[in-house]
Image (tube, rainbow, N blue to C red):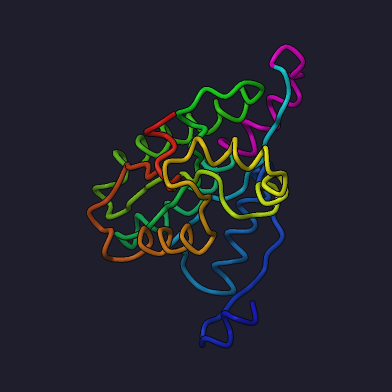
């Protein structure tokens, strides 16, 4: 928040449980009251589940799907009326390379991220005539806490990097730069697309 304000912008942190439809509606109302119309939505909430499929409970499955998929639809639905009225808007759904890869023990996560691709295409086709672009940013392994901890082990690092043609993991700044592009006027003719930021991993799996 301090960096936003130091750059001359305005910011507001609004707590939100994305699994609550009412909570999403309330957060959107509060954000618009505090900062004005929402022209850019980044759907970035997500959880994962590493577990043998036969051991996944109904409750665990539902938690992953509601958090990773249903929340994106609900957030998009909440901001879309204003975007339609203003004839402009950018919606960026954060997916994953796991949306196109078959990964053992990650059935719920892979299913949710594959569905994000479909949701992105459907909303893009429906809302394009209103000047709204809907795209999906699908990262591979990024230099964040969980991959960083795993890569500290040399054997794990070699196994990870051997699957990535670029032979490295991505940096958060690279994902941020792609998100900025997707949110900019330069991407006004880009819609319904999933861009895999994965160092080539999905092309070489």
Foreground residue, 2 or 83?
A: 2
Q: Name the residue at 59% across, 76% down.
A: 11
From the top left corner, tell me how far across and down residue 146 is, in percent: 70, 47
Total marks in image: 0
From the top left corner, tell me how far across and down residue 100 is, in percent: 45, 29
* Chain part drawn in magenta: 53-70
From the top left corner, tell me how far across and down residue 26 is, in percent: 64, 56
Quadrant of the snapshot with the C terminus: top left
Foreground residue, 145 or 76?
A: 145
Q: Name the residue at 46% across, 68% down.
A: 37
Query: Taking 172 as reference, is 47 left or right?
Result: right
Most extreme residue toward the top, as rendered?
A: 54
Q: Name the residue at 38% across, 61% down.
A: 183
Task: Tell me if residue 61 is in the magenta stretch.
Answer: yes
Q: Main secondary structure of the magenta part?
A: helix
Q: Name the residue at 60% across, 81% down.
A: 3
Quadrant of the snapshot with the N terminus: bottom right
**Is 146 above or below relative to 180?**
above
Query: Taking 120 as reference, is 156 left or right?
Result: right
From the top left corner, tell me how far across and down residue 136 is, in percent: 42, 45
**Is 148 above or below relative to 102?**
below
């Amino acid at each position: 928040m301090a960096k936003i304000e130091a750059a001359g912008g305005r910011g507001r942190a609004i707590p939100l449980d994305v699994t609550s439809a009412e909570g999403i509606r309330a957060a959107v109302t509060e954000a618009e009251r505090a900062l004005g119309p929402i022209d850019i939505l980044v759907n970035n909430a997500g959880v994962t589940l590493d577990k043998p499929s036969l051991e996944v409970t109904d409750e665990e499955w539902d938690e992953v799907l509601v958090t990773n998929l249903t929340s994106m639809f609900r957030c998009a639905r909440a901001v879309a009326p204003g975007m339609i009225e203003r004839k402009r808007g950018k919606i960026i759904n954060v997916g994953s390379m796991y949306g196109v890869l078959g990964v053992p023990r990650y059935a719920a996560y892979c299913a949710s991220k594959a569905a994000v691709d479909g949701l992105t295409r459907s909303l893009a086709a429906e809302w394009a005539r209103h000047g709204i672009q809907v795209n999906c940013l699908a990262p591979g392994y990024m230099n964040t806490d969980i991959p960083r901890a795993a890569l500290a082990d040399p054997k794990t690092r070699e196994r990870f990097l051997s699957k990535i043609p670029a032979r490295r993991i991505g940096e958060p700044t690279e994902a941020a730069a792609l998100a900025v592009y997707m949110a900019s006027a330069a991407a006004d003719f880009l819609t319904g697309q999933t861009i895999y930021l994965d160092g080539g991993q999905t092309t070489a799996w």
